[in-house]
Amino acid sequence: MRLDSRQSFPSGMEDYLSAYGWHFSKKMCEWASGKMYKKLNDGRKEYIRTYTKEQLENLAQRYGIKINITYDAVYVANMCKADFLDSSVIDEQHLLMYVKDVIEDADAYDGMPFTRFYADCIGSGTPIDWEDML
């Protein structure tokens, strides 16, 4: 059942949005990223080893990429790692460049990565324990 069929916000969502807006908290980022996987040629799932905020800050420094590493950026990096790394994104330097492009997209709206993540949860029927993400 799609989650957007409700007439009101799920329990705890308003508190989450009051605290973080349409952005990832550390707990939300870890939870969402922890569900990411690559699909192997034989159809099996291989869950990725997710990046931490500190690992991304170190990568950005190593490659000289100036970017504010927020939990939105960490989510985008992990999504890119699961979906694009070793395919259309050839290495971690280009992964960081992708993250920078998404986070600093001039015609994007505030909170776009989180909004897209939430839309995916709605579409897939994945419930979020909002109280646990505060």
Image: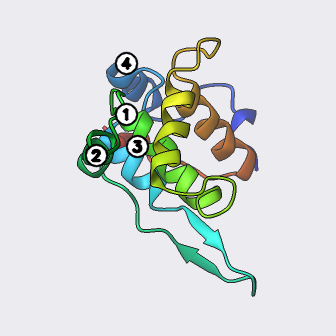
The residue sitting at 69% across, 51% down in the picture is 125
Q: Nearer the viewer, mark 4 or mark 2?
A: 2
| SS at mark 3 in the image | helix
Q: Position of residue 128 (x, y in %)?
A: 51, 47
The residue type indicated by label 1 comes to: Ile
Q: Position of residue 21 (x, y in %)?
A: 42, 20
The residue sitting at 35% across, 43% down in the picture is 63
Q: 76 left or right of 64?
A: right
12 vs 72, nearest the viewer: 72
Q: Rounded to the nearest whole Å, what is the CA distance between mark 3 and mark 4?
A: 21 Å
| Above or below 48: residue 33 | above
What residue is shown with label 1? 65
Q: Is residue 132 visible?
A: no
Q: Position of residue 78 (x, y in %)?
A: 48, 52
| SS at mark 4 in the image | helix
Q: Rounded to the nearest whole Å, what is the CA distance between mark 3 and mark 2?
A: 16 Å
Q: Is residue 34 visible?
A: yes
The residue type indicated by label 4 comes to: Ser
The residue sitting at 52% across, 15% down in the picture is 110
Q: Rounded to the nearest whole Å, what is the CA distance between mark 1 and mark 2?
A: 8 Å
97 vs 74, nearest the viewer: 97
The residue sitting at 68% across, 83% down in the picture is 44
What residue is shown with label 3? 74
Determine which of the numbered discs, if any, sits on residue 18 in the image.
4
Q: How many neighbours does mark 2 have within 10 angstroms: few (below 14), some (14-19), or many (20 or more)? A: few
Determine which of the numbered discs, if any, sits on residue 11 in the image.
none
The residue type indicated by label 2 comes to: Arg
Q: 98 left or right of 17?
A: right
Determine which of the numbered discs, if any, sits on residue 62 in the image.
2
